[in-house]
Image (tube, grey):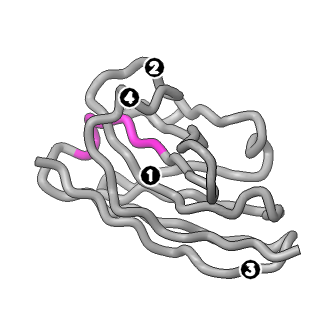
Amino acid sequence: QVLLAESGGGLVQAGGSLRLSCVASGGTFSSLTMGWFRQAPGKEREFVAAISWIPDNTYYADPVKGRFTISKDNAKNTVYLQMNRLKPEDTAVYYCAAKRRESHYTILTYYEYWGQGTKVTVSS
């Protein structure tokens, strides 16, 4: 129903920046909560950031707070993740996700739609 496509990953040095994008199609983007999750090698997928359909409502995992910024452009059906001051521990495949319910923003199982992921590698 809702298709998500991430882009913008790559290889950067520690301290650098990347901007991830996720384009949504097949649904009403402006009424969805959008989130970013990541999965590092050998680890479980974890919450990174989320933004509700209310523009001022954003949520961040503690390890990325102050470094990452989530935003969206409803006209383009796109959500972004600006990642600054990247660290080696940020290395992971980053997944875009969406859900209808405006609650449980950090819980993976509440998200209904998922992209295929984009790889971010941060060298030390």
Q: Work out whether mark 1 precedes mark 3 in sequence or the reverse, and give the earlier one.
A: 3
Q: Secondary structure at mark 1?
A: strand
Q: CA distance from mark 2 to mark 3?
A: 32 Å
3 and 4 marks in contact (CB < 8 Å): no
Q: Which residue is mark 3?
A: 12
Q: Hey, what amino acid is under mark 1?
A: Lys
Q: CA distance from mark 4 to mark 1?
A: 22 Å
What label sits on residue 44 in the rendered view? none
Q: CA distance from mark 1 to mark 3?
A: 24 Å
Q: Secondary structure at mark 4?
A: helix
Q: Which residue is mark 1?
A: 72
Query: Dot 4, how many residues are within 10 Å of its Cα: few (below 14), some (14-19), or many (20+)?
Result: few
Q: Position of residue 64 (x, y in %)?
A: 74, 45
Outermost residue on the front side: it is 42
Quadrant of the image containing the C terminus: bottom right
Q: Hey, what amino acid is under mark 3?
A: Val
Q: Which residue is mark 2?
A: 104
- For marks 2 and 1, give the one nearer the viewer: 2
In the image, is residue 30 part of the stretch drawn in magenta? yes
Q: Residue at x 37, y 35 (%)?
A: 33
Q: Hey, what amino acid is under mark 2?
A: His
Q: Is residue 13 above or below residue 106?
A: below
